[in-house]
Amino acid sequence: MKQALLVIDIQNDYFKGGLMELVGAEKAADNAKTVISKFRREKLPVIYIQHVASRPEAGFFLPDTEGVKINERVKPLEDEKVIVKHFPNSFIRTGLQEHLDSMGITDITIVGMMTHMCVDATVRAARDMGYNTVVVGDACATRDLIIDGDTVKAEEVQKSFLAALNHFYSTVKSTNEI
């Protein structure tokens, strides 16, 4: 078993004043920082995923903006890999799988933003590719969603997506459990 940590899209646009503010982004990022510190102490790879919009109409994560930058709370070290993506799934057209495989990684721990979108898509793809995954639920954040005119609160979105991922696709743990 060889482990790596994926830090997905903890970028400025998801924080207060950003173009796509998430509920609980600060707390999730602080928990992610704790997990990152653990991996660094244990000399395990920490890999950052940075979403950069490829279409101007995306509205956030626009190239060359403050919002696209990785948040200071979890800033990568110079020797840590940053992989740029343009889709919710961190594996699509990124070289992430090749990078993980080149290091012999079998187990991935995931922290990050947009539980219902990028975290979910990446976790499912990772499992489909044969990786064992752990999602650190309290080191992830999401937002309110609307369906049929009804608002689903971020807390419920978070619980629902983590519950759906737990068991077959991943094991969901808390920062303290990690």
Image (spheres, rainbow, N blue to C red):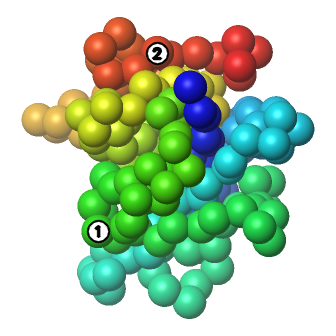
Which residue is farthest left? Answer: 148
> Residue 118, percent across and down?
38, 48
Amino acid identity at mark 2: Thr
Q: Residues within 10 Å of mark 1 (few under 14, many from 20)?
A: few
- Quarter of the picture holding the N terminus: top right
Residue in front for this viewpoint, 2 or 79: 2
Q: Secondary structure at mark 1?
A: loop
**Residue in view at x 28 percent, y 38 percent:** 129
**Residue in view at x 68 percent, y 48 percent:** 45
Q: Quadrant of residue 12?
A: bottom right
- Residue 52 in the image: above or below residue 96: below
Q: Residues within 10 Å of mark 2 (few under 14, many from 20)?
A: some
Q: Which residue is mark 1?
A: 93
> Residue 51, percent across and down?
45, 67
The disc, 1 or 2, on the residue closer to the chain's N-terminal end is 1
- Residue 151 in the image: above or below residue 47: above
**Residue in view at x 61 percent, y 54 percent:** 47
Residue in front for this viewpoint, 34 or 149: 34
Which residue is farthest right? Answer: 41
Amino acid identity at mark 1: Arg
Label 1, label 2: how far apart the Cα atoms are: 26 Å
Q: Which residue is mark 2?
A: 171
Residue in front for this viewpoint, 29 or 23: 29
The dot on residue 137 is none
> Residue 72, percent across and down?
79, 62
- On screen, residue 126 versus residue 99, left or right, reads left
**Residue in view at x 28 percent, y 61 percent:** 92
Q: Is residue 18 visible?
A: no
Q: Secondary structure at mark 2?
A: strand
Q: Determine whether label 1 and label 2 are within 8 Å by CB.
A: no
- Counting labels gives 2
